[in-house]
Image (cartoon, rainbow, N blue to C red):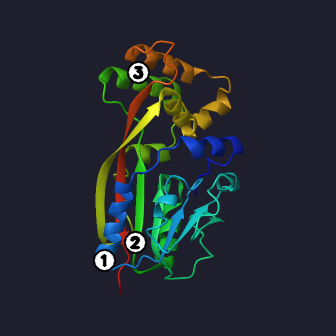
Amino acid sequence: MSHRFFEGAKHAKIYAVARPRYSDKVLDLILKFCQAGGGKLKLAVDVACGTGHQSTLPLVGRFEKVIGVDVSEEQLKQAPENVANLEFRQSAAEYLSFLDPNSVDLVTAASSLHWFNIPEFYREVERVLSPGGCLAVYTYGWATFREPGAQEILEKFISTYLADFFHAGNLMAIGGYKDVKLPFDDLQRDTMKLEMDWTVEQLCDYFQSTSVWQKRLKVFPDCDSLNALAANLRRFYGWSSEDEHPRLTALFSVAILLGRKPLE
């Protein structure tokens, strides 16, 4: 079965602003893979698109038409409006009945495959992709820091407050999809680094946007551990109370899996 953790209205609002945006390098790599096999650039479908800001909008301008698909009505309420050649549909990734067979040139699933019924999703991808069409699955793990001391603070926060709320899907993403196999023979696997120049507040918002934190909130609704995380990082970096919005660099490792449907 698939899992649904991102459907609350409040969660959707923070998701729209707090999630890392994938860099142009990630999308350029996907586009290069599509073009290398002679694939067309007419229709791209981004499944489990969330609010559409992280992985759907970057496809606009690269394809003639882009469709963002998500099961959550609240997530889609936060999606960008009035973007040329972009539309959104409410649907599960495993059931794309509004798409004709062999009609899609690229299906993308960003930070989401680990929540799907994967066999059912793959069957639907094989149905809707045109011959030579591509599937791009990619995700990032937890934020990390270059400075060992800051990384130690972050790891202690995760192990103390979040580890008990990990789902198997979280572990798949953290592990970089190392055991994931796409349903095609023509494959490519890559990794990239994503750097986010964030304030401490943005880092805390990112954690609030995760499924793990949302699960913790249901058990501990008054938890103030994010305030403690921010205070510990301020002390480590030597920021005074007068530094209202100090900035730091959060690093993410991005795993990218690409596959191509056979021409015949």
Residue 68 in the image: x percent, y percent? 57, 64
Question: Which residue is label 2 attached to?
Answer: 134
Question: Which residue is label 3 attached to?
Answer: 153
Residue type pointed to by label 1: Gly
Residue 37 got which mark? 1
Q: Secondary structure at mark 1?
A: loop
Residue 97 in the image: x percent, y percent? 62, 75
Residue type pointed to by label 2: Cys
Asked if residue 116 lies left or right of residue 76, the reply is left
Task: Indicate whether 161 appears above or below 165.
Answer: above
Callout 2: 10 Å neighbours few (<14), some, many (20+)? many
Callout 1: 10 Å neighbours few (<14), some, many (20+)? some
Q: Secondary structure at mark 3?
A: helix
Asked if residue 76 lies left or right of residue 250, the reply is right
Instruction: Pick the quarter of the image with the N terminus.
Output: bottom right
Q: Secondary structure at mark 2?
A: strand
Callout 3: 10 Å neighbours few (<14), some, many (20+)? some
Task: Indicate whether 160 appears above or below 240.
Answer: below
Task: Indicate whether 52 appears above or below 62.
Answer: above
Task: Indicate whether 12 appears above or below 150.
Answer: below
Residue in view at x 56 percent, y 56 percent: 52
Residue 106 visible in rendering: yes
Residue 191 in the image: x percent, y percent? 30, 51
Residue type pointed to by label 3: Ile
Residue in view at x 49 percent, y 75 percent: 64
In primary-sequence order, the first of circles 1 and 3 is 1
In primary-sequence order, the first of circles 3 and 2 is 2
Residue in view at x 55 percent, y 37 percent: 212
Residue at the bottom extreme? 264
Q: CA distance from mark 3 to mark 2?
A: 40 Å
